[in-house]
Amino acid sequence: MAETIAVVMAGGLGTRLRSLTVAVPKPLLPVGSRAILEIILRQIQRAGIERVYVSIGYRGYLVKAFLRDLAIDGLCIEVLEEDEPLGTAGALALLPPGDEDVFSMNGDVLTRAPIAEAIASHAASTASLTMLVHRHPVPLPYGLVDTDGARVLGIQEKPTVDFRVATGMYLVRRSVIDALKVGERVDMPDLITSLIAGGQEVRSFEFHELWTDVADLADYEKVNLNSSEWEDL
């Protein structure tokens, strides 16, 4: 089995954190004593991955400078430069040729996901792509009414509904990446939809450990209130 390499998507504009990301790209924002990007890279190394590419765009020179000063034992870090924003999947086409499976992770994800288990599960499957998914409970503030026409069959008072959500982490076969066009913007949901429409197998790997994306100011404040969660990495 070929090794798995990783790609961290760190080129986004971070528009929903604009007050903080005017000068600093989102992956470099601190959570406790470490930048988000360093936390991600240390988790990737703990999963047994030895080579990672960081895709950069917005204020990429700052990310490159940060990586030059960052040393993580056992992890070789290289950079992929996006001349134009390529979406959450397009940067994969910038990878040098190879036969490895690729673990792709958004640069604003903080998680305790069992990445090594996901890699093994994907490798043992025939799937073209495996999505790491997480259960997300959504409490409804209203009574949920079950009806048959006008007849009421029952009511659930303020139930909680569980959804499986995409986590911004994926395992991708090289055959999928080789079909991407260099320089073309591709978002991961569109890529997954096209694979399914083309009859290719897309699997899910569900995990229950901690996961959050740092999407906006409320998320950022929350992860900093719990920053001790990431201090042991």
Image (tube, rainbow, N blue to C red):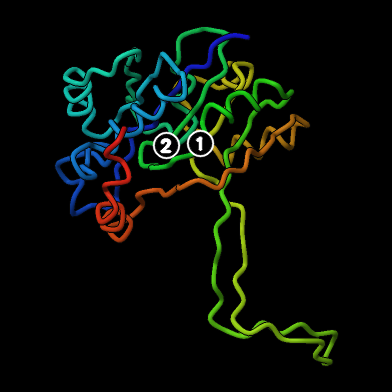
Give the amino acid type for the residue marked by disc 2 in the picture.
Asn
Q: Residue furthest front?
A: 232
Are the residues at dot 2 and dot 1 in contact (C-beta closer than 8 Å)? Answer: yes
From the viewer's side, name the closer residue of 33 and 198.
Answer: 33
Residue tagged 1: 169
Q: Residue at x 25, y 52 (%)?
A: 224
Please tell me in which quadrant of the rendered image residue 188 appears: top right
Image location (x, y in percent) of residue 207: 58, 43
Look at the picture and state if 109 lies above or below 46. Answer: below
Question: What secondary structure is found at the residue carrying circle 1?
Answer: strand
Whole-angstrom CA distance, mark 2 to mark 1, is 7 Å
Specify whether 143 is left or right of 83.
right
Give the amino acid type for the residue marked by disc 1 in the picture.
Met
Q: Residues within 10 Å of mark 2 (few under 14, many from 20)?
A: many
Q: Earlier in the sequence, mark 2 or mark 1?
A: 2
Q: Residue at x 74, y 29 (%)?
A: 200
> What's the mark number on residue 106?
2
> What's the mark number on residue 228?
none
From the viewer's side, name the closer residue of 184 and 232.
Answer: 232
Q: Quadrant of the N terminus?
A: top right
Specify whether 166 is left or right of 150.
left
Please tell me in which quadrant of the rendered image residue 59 appears: top left
Tell how many labels.
2
Image location (x, y in percent) of residue 191: 60, 34
Look at the picture and state if 208 lies above or below 70. Answer: below
Question: What secondary structure is found at the residue carrying circle 2?
Answer: strand
Q: Quadrant of the C terminus?
A: top left
Image location (x, y in percent) of residue 91: 44, 25
Q: Residues within 10 Å of mark 1 (few under 14, many from 20)?
A: many
Specify whether 102 is left or right of 162.
left
